[in-house]
Amino acid sequence: MDVALTQSIVNTATALASAKTSDAVNVAVLKQAMNMQEATAATLLEALPQPALATSGTLGTQVNTFA
């Protein structure tokens, strides 16, 4: 077997293993960033003032739907 070919195969295998590890780290960082954004968005939504909803009468207490 040619030594250069063997070295090429070893280099390719090493590069693929490194890329797989790098991809796993990138996905983990992305998940962490998305979780932080989710928490921030939830906090912002909770901070919004809630409008007073109608509890009596016909205005705002009934929904008319038809198909």
Image (cartoon, rainbow, N blue to C red):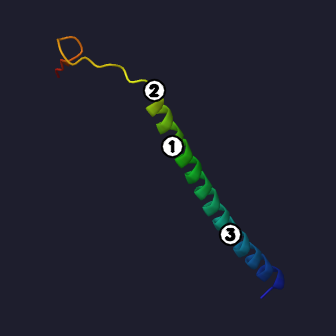
Please name which of the two marks, 3 or 1, marks the residue nearer to the observer. Answer: 1
**Horizontal side, residue 41 vs residue 4: left or right:** left
Please name which of the two marks, 3 or 2, marks the residue nearer to the observer. Answer: 2
| Pick the front one: 28 or 46 | 46
Q: Amino acid at mark 2?
A: Leu
Give residue 54's position: percent from left, percent from top.
Answer: 25, 17
Task: Please rate how many residues cluster around mark 3, counting C-alpha atoms within 10 Å: few if below 14, some from 14 to 19, many from 20.
Answer: few
Q: Secondary structure at mark 3?
A: helix
Q: CA distance from mark 3 to mark 1?
A: 35 Å
Q: Amino acid at mark 1?
A: Ala
Q: Earlier in the sequence, mark 1 or mark 2?
A: 1
Q: Which mark is residue 9?
A: none
Q: Which mark is residue 16?
A: 3
Task: Please rate how many residues cluster around mark 1, counting C-alpha atoms within 10 Å: few if below 14, some from 14 to 19, many from 20.
Answer: few
What residue appears at the point 16 percent right and 20 percent down from the top-left corner? 66
Quarter of the image where the C terminus is located? top left
Check disc 2 and report the residue beneath it. 48
Quadrant of the rendered image containing residue 51: top left
Q: CA distance from mark 1 to mark 2?
A: 15 Å
Q: Earlier in the sequence, mark 3 or mark 2?
A: 3
Check disc 1 and report the residue beneath it. 39
Q: Earlier in the sequence, mark 3 or mark 1?
A: 3
| Pick the front one: 30 or 54 | 54
What residue appears at the point 55 percent right and 42 percent down from the top-left corner? 37
Task: Establish if 43 lies above or below 33.
Answer: above
| Pick the front one: 37 or 56 | 56
Q: CA distance from mark 3 to mark 2?
A: 48 Å
Quarter of the image where the N terminus is located? bottom right
Give residue 48's position: percent from left, percent from top.
Answer: 45, 26
